[in-house]
Amino acid sequence: MRNHPRAPRPLSAAIVGLQHLHPGHYLPLFAGIEGVRVGSVVEPEPALREAFASEHSLRAYAGLDEMLAGEKPDIAAIFLPHADCPAAAIRCAEAGAHVMVEKPMAATAAGAAAAVAAAHRARRRLTTGYCWRFHPAAREIKRLVAGGAIGEIIGGEGRCAAGRLGRYIEGHSSWMLERARSGGGPLFNLGVHWIDLFRWILQDEVAEASGRTVKVSPRFDIEDNCFAHLQFGRGAVVGLDISYTVPDSFPHGRDLYIALRGTRGVISWAPAYEGESDIVSLCSDDTALSGAPVRQIEFRLEPVKGYSGYMGREYVRSFVEAVRTGAQPPITGEDGVAALRVVEAIYRAAARKRWTKVES
């Protein structure tokens, strides 16, 4: 008799918090993973809670303690105001759930570190949504850098500008514009993606940072723009341009770009949009690339419904696999803490108007 492979153990998931732009877009990602089912939602606001639960056939709870008293999900996906994420992550881990905390995990690095420590004590897995690591273009850039295709890295730049402030008000997440609840402006919400991506590509930590913030909207106490430089431990200097002030006329409402310059060449990538080709440009004097010193490397991702499409699905899939096997997820809570320590150093540098060391 032929032995058939066992189906993976079914896993249950709960959505914690709906006053955020992303929860509904995670449902298709979970649905695309075999053996995982989102069964419940926690949200204090009655109208949001009941509408979401009814639309997606979920059990609805007004509070986290109420949900955990009634059921024990394998995975809790947390989409709360950043300041509230650590307490919820700690509560879920202590109740036995593995935790996905939407980036940046907390309003402070200390808060994120507390959540990580609690997950370790409870022997639960914890991750955060730095899904850009799963883009094949990012992975190719990392491979080329590690292989020395552009020599020793001297520096780079990253631009991440997306949307206007109104989208948070329209999306029931106006807390994003309140420093006490969000931690800060686009640097907290968008810049952390690029900070994590450069850390991962370079396999190095940021040692010092400088920065300036710019306020455009007087109604809110967050910055609208942040400009920073990061000095990595092995010497590379990376400039960041992070913003909420993309004009409505800008294609797709996002302006994204990363590049790295080395002693023998340059790699650049302007991430494309749904259904379009991604092009990584490589110019190198590396003799191993003789015959093709200039390359245009094309990637076309399969269309996937949900937050960040293909990248989002692979992020969720990697965490589900870690939960099932007991391995560490590719993106850990420690990665979230590291990104927030860089953010805090940039803000301190902006206040002091001088380079500032990143706490370690």
Image (spheres, rainbow, N blue to C red):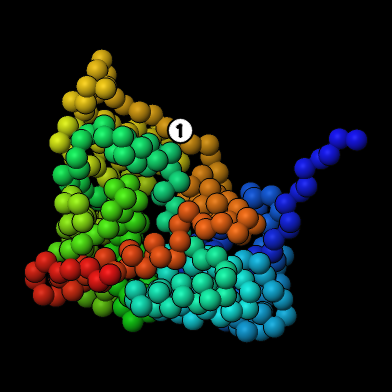
Q: Return the residue nearer the eye: 274 or 10.
A: 10
Q: Which residue is mark 1?
A: 300
Q: Image quadrant of residue 280?
A: top left
Q: Is residue 21 visible?
A: no
Question: Residue 338 placed where, x, y %?
Answer: 33, 65
Q: Return the residue nearer the eye: 320 or 170.
A: 320
Q: Return the residue nearer the eye: 238 or 162.
A: 238
Which residue is located at x 18 percent, y 68 percent? 357
Residue 42 vertical position relative to residue 1 in the rendered view, above or below: below
Q: Which quadrant, please, contains the C terminus?
A: bottom left
Residue 354 vertical position relative to residue 320 in the rendered view, above or below: below
Residue 124 vertical position relative to residue 137 in the rendered view, above or below: below
Q: Amino acid at mark 1?
A: Arg
Q: Which quadrant, please, contains the N terminus?
A: top right
Q: Is residue 12 visible?
A: yes
Which residue is located at x 51 percent, y 44 percent? 310
